[in-house]
């Protein structure tokens, strides 16, 4: 009887280890909001740079993109720091974060240099942004094994490549459409998927005593 | 007959075992996340984490993020080894219990 009890207790401990390891590895990171956030930031930058806010035209309003992007980085850093308080740091989280940080750090100086040298046009901007966002989406989709995000990466790469063959207006429209589907729609889809995942995961395992 | 191994008493406690197992899957975790996952009270959780820290199985880092205090826990190499040894011992004991 005592041996049986001990055996059961040992099995209970083994089950506890298995359950807790699985619980710790279960992904709780949510990324959907970041896509929507950056989609809106791109729209704001485009509207501002094209004179939508009453300012000068695209080529002259060189402040629109840098100011919006720097503002976006600061705001998203604050939001991400708040969210990360509720989540543990994982290797996957760090990998994804470094892909997007690398993308941002690489894109910014090129775009800034093109802007201040006066060599920026719609074709170049869409080609660079499309290529960078395509690469970042594809890389993170491979880490997360997320086919939908891979499809977004393909759309961004296609947009970047297609802009080289289209007229300036057509390239601009294609960019707006890509932002809508790959940032706003995909972001909302991601947010819905995150909230479903969190409901399924639940909280608290009730291991309350030593 | 081979001698049966003894279970490490520091790890054998249910909550301490749960905490070490949780920390194996993450790089570092905040106190509140560990509380959420274990369903433990602040006092009990703090006391058990202190025992693990004293044994050298977890490392603690305290910092401020946006002016709010944050306590982060991460498993040490000694903790990882101790948990591996504990699981090995547990399997040996279970094998012996099944044989008996």
Image (cartoon, helix red, strand yellow):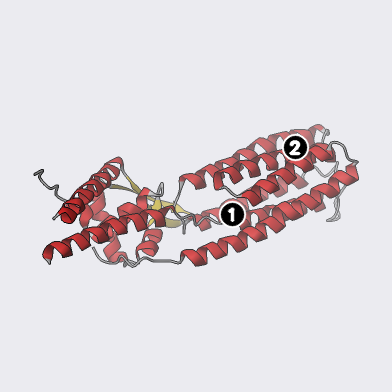
The kind of secondary structure element at disc 1 is loop
Q: Is A27 on the left or on the right of A37, as rendered? A: left
The numbered mark, 2 or 1, whose residue comes first in the sequence reads 1
Q: What residue sits right under mark 1 in the picture? A: A31
Which residue is painted at 71% across and 58% down in the image?
A: A185
Q: Local crowd at mark 2 within 10 Å, few (<14), some, or many (≥20)?
A: some
**Residue A104, above or below A41:** above
Quadrant of res A208: bottom left
Q: What residue sits right under mark 2 in the picture? A: A128
Q: Is A81 on the left or on the right of A129, as rendered? A: left
Foreground pick, B6 / B62: B6
Alpha-carbon distance for marks 2 and 1? 23 Å
Which residue is painted at 56% across and 48% down in the image?
A: A144
- Image mark for residue A69: none
Q: Position of residue B77 (x, y in %)?
A: 30, 40
Residue under mark 1: which chain is it in?
Answer: A
Residue under mark 2: which chain is it in?
Answer: A
Q: Is A179 on the left or on the right of A101, as rendered? A: right
Q: Are marks 2 and 1 in contact (CB under 8 Å)?
A: no
Q: Position of residue B61 (x, y in %)?
A: 36, 48
Q: Position of residue A66 (x, y in %)?
A: 72, 44
Foreground pick, A16 / A37: A16
**Residue A129, above or below A200:** above
Residue B85 visible in the shown view = yes
Which residue is painted at 88% across and 40% down in the image?
A: A166
Foreground pick, A48 / B58: B58
């Amino acid at each position: 009887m005592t041996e049986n009890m001990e055996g059961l207790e040992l099995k209970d401990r083994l089950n506890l280890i298995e359950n807790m390891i699985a619980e710790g590895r279960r992904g709780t990171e949510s990324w959907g909001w970041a896509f929507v956030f950056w989609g809106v930031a791109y729209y704001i930058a485009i509207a501002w740079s094209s004179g939508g806010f009453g300012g000068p035209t695209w080529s002259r309003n060189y402040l629109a993109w840098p100011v919006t992007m720097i503002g976006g980085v600061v705001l998203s850093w604050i939001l991400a720091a708040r969210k990360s308080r509720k989540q543990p740091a994982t290797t996957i989280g760090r990998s994804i974060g470094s892909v997007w940080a690398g993308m941002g750090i690489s894109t910014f100086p090129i775009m800034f240099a093109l802007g201040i040298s006066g060599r920026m046009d719609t074709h170049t901007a869409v080609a660079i942004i499309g290529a960078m966002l395509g690469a970042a989406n594809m890389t993170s989709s491979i880490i997360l094994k997320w086919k939908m995000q891979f499809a977004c990466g393909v759309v961004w790469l296609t947009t970047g490549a297609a802009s080289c063959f289209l007229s300036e207006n057509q390239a601009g429209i294609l960019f707006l459409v890509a932002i809508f589907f790959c940032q706003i729609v995909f972001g909302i889809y991601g947010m819905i998927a995150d909230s479903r995942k969190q409901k399924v995961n639940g909280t608290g395992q009730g291991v309350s005593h030593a | 007959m081979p001698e049966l191994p003894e279970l490490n008493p520091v790890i054998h406690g249910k909550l301490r075992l749960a905490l070490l197992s949780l920390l194996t899957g993450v790089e570092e975790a905040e106190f509140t996340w560990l509380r959420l996952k274990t369903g433990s009270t602040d006092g009990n959780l703090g006391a058990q984490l202190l025992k693990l820290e004293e044994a050298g199985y977890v490392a603690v880092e305290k910092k401020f993020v946006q002016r709010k205090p944050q306590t982060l826990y991460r498993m040490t190499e000694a903790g990882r080894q101790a948990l591996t040894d504990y699981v090995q011992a547990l399997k040996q004991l279970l094998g012996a219990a099944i044989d008996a």
